[in-house]
């Protein structure tokens, strides 16, 4: 199982990543360990804002890439409505990337 997640940081910025173990990965971000992202070393995460799961690493990487390219406003909209990426509108715009993804809120 792979998890795609969005973290809300202390400066209100949003970090997006993927992992196989969300609890371990979130702890790495919080502890600012070498395994944590460079981005979250200077911007401490305060919460997991959104999360999705998939069985495919490829789908996880594609969704992460898609989210990272969004504007801050679009990321905020996605956090408020995590089902946005599964709507017909999104599928039409972005293809079949999301077919194997099970969407769920944190």
Image (tube, grey):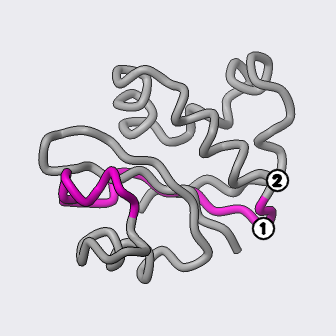
Find the residue positioned furthest to the left. 10
- 26 lies left or right of 60: left
Q: Position of residue 35 (x, y in %)?
A: 43, 74
Q: Kindly check if marks 1 and 2 are in contact, taking CB atoms under 8 A apart as contact.
A: yes
Find the residue positioned furthest to the front. 34
Q: Position of residue 74 (x, y in %)?
A: 43, 23
User: Which label is found at residue 55?
Assistant: 1
Q: Which residues are magenta?
A: 37-57
| Residue plotted at (13% across, 50% down) | 10
Q: Secondary structure at mark 2?
A: loop
| Residue at the disc numbered 2 | 100
**Where does the N terminus fall, quadrant-wise?**
bottom right
| Residue plotted at (58% across, 68% down) | 19
| Residue plotted at (79% across, 18% down) | 92
- 26 lies left or right of 90: left
Asked if residue 50 is among those painted magenta in the image, a careful observer would answer: yes
Asked if residue 51 is among those painted magenta in the image, a careful observer would answer: yes
Q: Is residue 86 above or below residue 46?
A: above
In the depicted view, which residue is nearer to us: 84 or 62?
Answer: 62
């Amino acid at each position: 199982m792979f998890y795609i997640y969005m973290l809300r940081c202390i400066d209100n910025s949003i970090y997006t990543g993927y992992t196989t173990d969300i609890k371990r990965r979130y702890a790495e971000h919080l502890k600012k360990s070498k395994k944590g992202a460079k981005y979250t070393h200077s911007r401490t995460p305060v919460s997991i804002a959104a999360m999705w799961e998939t069985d495919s690493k490829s789908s996880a990487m594609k969704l992460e890439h898609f989210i990272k390219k969004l504007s801050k406003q679009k990321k905020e909209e996605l956090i408020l409505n995590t089902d946005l990426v599964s709507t017909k509108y999104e599928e039409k715009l972005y293809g079949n990337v999301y077919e194997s993804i099970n969407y769920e809120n944190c």
